[in-house]
Amino acid sequence: MSLSTKYDPSSVEDKWYKHWMDKGFFHSEPNPDKEPYSIVIPPPNVTGVLHMGHMLNNTIQDVLIRKARMEGKEACWVPGTDHASIATEAKVVRMLREKGIKKSDLTRDEFLEHAWEWKEKYGGIILEQLKKLGASCDWERTSFTMDDHYYKAVVRVFVDLYNKGYLYRGLRMVNWDVEAQTTVSNEEVLYREGGEKSKLYKVKYQIKDSDEFVVIATQRPETIMGDTGIAVNPTDDRFKHLIGKKALVPFINREIPIIGDEYVELDFGTGCLKVTPAHDPNDYEIGQRHNLEVIDTINLDGTLNEKCEVPAYVGRDRFEIRKQIIKDLDEAGLLMGDEDFVTRIGRSERTDSVIEPKLSLQWFINMKEISKKAHAAVMDDDVVLHPAKFKNTYHHWMENVKDWCVSRQLWWGQRIPAYYYGEGENDFVVAETIEEALVIAQEKSGKKDLTINDLKQDEDVLDTWASSWLFPLEVFKGFDDQYFKDGKIIEGSNKELDYYYPTSTLVTAPEILFFWVARMIIAGYEYTGKKPFKDVYLTGIVRDKQRRKMSKSLGNSPDPLDLIAQYGADAVRTGMLFSSPAGNDLLYDEKLIEQGRNFGNKIWNAFRLVQGWEVDNKVSGDSNKAAIVWFEAKFNQTLEEVEDHFKKFRISDALMATYKLIWNDFCSWYLEMIKPDYQKPIDAATKEATITFFEKILRLLHPFMPFITEELYHELGERNEDDCMIVAAWPKVESYNANILKEAELAFDIIGNVRNTRNAKQIAPKELLNLKVKTSDFAKFNSFAGVIKKLSNLDVFEVTEDKVENSSSFVIKGDEFFIPLAGTVDMDAEREEMQKELEYTKGFLKSVEKKLSNERFVQNAPEQVVAMEKKKMEDAQAKIKAIEESLASMA
């Protein structure tokens, strides 16, 4: 069969993906005869579409799972999606608004009907897109965090943690999204790169019964009416005489104490800090230490309320009031000026609105005790982070872990299983079902006449992370009735969980190391006593060439599906991996994708070349034996290197080693070594060896470029429909001749120098040259002498005892090589060029010697800079000597 000149991914990729799916190659079942290798996908939001971060993350996962599958392991990659409470609810609300329907006009059940309808229509888009990438997930195991069994598991864990004393309801400071009207997790609070421009306003606060005043710098003057204290550093000589006195809040003249607290920085702002416990987490902590009053002046929708005590401000938006209060302060003579500064402003990931810190009655998990095993697991390398630099980050976070607010003021999500039966602060019970709740409520209240109608379930739902932290356990239905008892998953009860868990590797982004990874580790130890995975590979962020994070708002992120359509999935996969070492950001450049496409074409054309060679049994293959032995050794050496890279999770390096083996060693060297003359046949042994090598490199490449390797695997020979590259055996390292690698490197060095001489002297590639070498050991060239002659186009390659006149020379490892030029080049022109080069080099040497003769430079410059200049001097001296000797031989 004759292949087209260029590889066409569009005719290959859908065909092979369908075949893999039809044959069930992605599906896995527990197999006691095989070692399991399992990965759970970081479940993308059900609202999501494929972006460049997904491309990188899922390509790495697919590389790992495909390699494990080829190694004969029972490879299981579990896909799924996250219900994404805030994002999905926002999408549904927007959809309803377009239809003229307000959420407030619907009952909870009516709204959820619309939400499920939306999910069924749009929720699977991203998983379908992953198939275009070649992701070999076990799609039969696809999980969704709102599936019935998953919903039940999340509720069960909530109840269990409450009964164990880890979960409580309390008034605490939270991140409040005023647009979505819900709390959000720390992970959902984003800060724009480089910060945002803001102003620091300087406001006078009068000291009670005194003409004295202090000036306070604030970024948020709209919170002034919620001030309940002024803090100064107790060591600050400027203000410590004020500690214990009272100050007056501007406009409303409320008396507030002046307190000493070491939190206040001496050199920031004016040295005085207004304390607003209801609207700042740090102020809240100060307030708790000093028993300050908490006055919440901002409503849930971001407007000011009656507690601000200024009727003209009530009901107006916080940022509108900011402008107004600055004007009012100025008119009252209380504004002492302002200054521009850049600060970090927290914004909701979902709505982009500025986060309002608020005190709110919410549900929390007490994290300090429950996280201890998870902390130790990473510190003791039971769970290994790649790269290891994130270990210190993890340690710092776990050392300072805060209680986790798990309640959200939404309807889409797992509804909190708390049931209220009275108006008292503790008139509630927690249970998996309302029937169970009724029994507990009757007992707790002492009211046996309570009915289900007397119970009201909490309106809030759980934070999305409070479902996804169970992902490695619940994708295998770990919390089902028959497996879960007394707050633990019963070991040995669940065949799939026992086989696949702990999973092998997690691939995810560093920004969710705490919010997802750490919490999965916590849940794993809490419910199984085991870690959820052994290795965590943390990818970098995909950035553009200006180092900006790719985003829709900046318009700097290409559509991954457009890239796949243009270049093919293999090209996109390799392009993403060419420069993505673990934990370091990837600077995306479309040229990398082009490089991936060019790589595919290189392999394609290499196969076309080999396929076109006719075999003649009469042709001797003796001249190709060294090439075959060399490439066998080179393949095994590279395979060792690739295995080491995989072991250390250097996936990009593993690809680059494979790339160099194929492009440089196989295509540029090996095929050129053995290639017969134009339209001449090749011997059978060489052709057979080459086909074997081709299959080996395709196996090595398959995890990275699954489609082209599958296509060419089937072109290499007749195969049945079950004999596919995806399940072919991963190559094993075999013993090899290391000496031949050194001999080959010497030969390549010689060939390179001869080719450079041709280019420099403008000698045509087809013109035969002679090469002579002054050496005491010509035998070391014997294995590759034929290769040197063939690839350098030499008539003669021989030893010489003397320097060769009228020649160009080069030295390799003490041996001097000569290419006679008489009759090949214009000797007069050659001498003239050499003379020019000699004069230039002498001038360069003079400038370097002048620099080194400057004592101030030698004494003050860094040691490595001086060493570099000395090396330049030595190189110039050696070059001058070589040119002068060459000119003398041409005289």
Image (tube, rainbow, N blue to C red):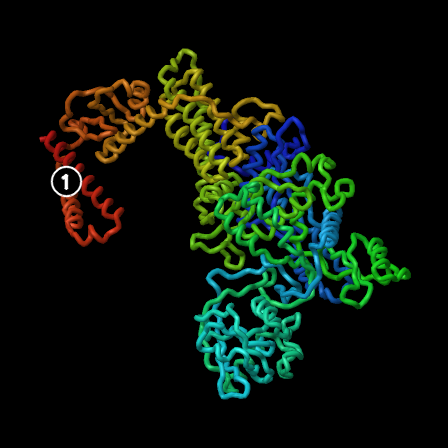
Q: Nearer the viewer, residue 616 or 791?
A: 791
Quadrant where the C terminus lies?
Answer: top left
Left or right? Give the position of 4 relative to 784.
right
**Can see residue 243?**
yes
Given residues 5 and 442, the one toward you in this image is 442
The x, y position of residue 868, in whole percent, is 24, 45
Q: Residues within 10 Å of mark 1 (few under 14, many from 20)?
A: many
Residue 785, horizontal then vertical, whole percent? 29, 20
In the image, 684 versus 321, the foreground residue is: 321
Outermost residue, left side: 891
Which secondary structure lies at badge 1?
A: helix
Give me the residue at 48% from left, 32% from top: 643
Q: How many numbered marks have been drawn onto this rendered protein structure?
A: 1
Visible in this render: residue 564?
A: no
Residue indicated by mark 1: 838
Image quadrant where residue 363 sits? bottom right
Q: Position of residue 94 (x, y in %)?
A: 67, 62
Asked if residue 887 lies left or right of residue 642, the reply is left
Please give the name of the residue rendered at 55% of the width and 37% of the height, measured from the top-left corner. 64
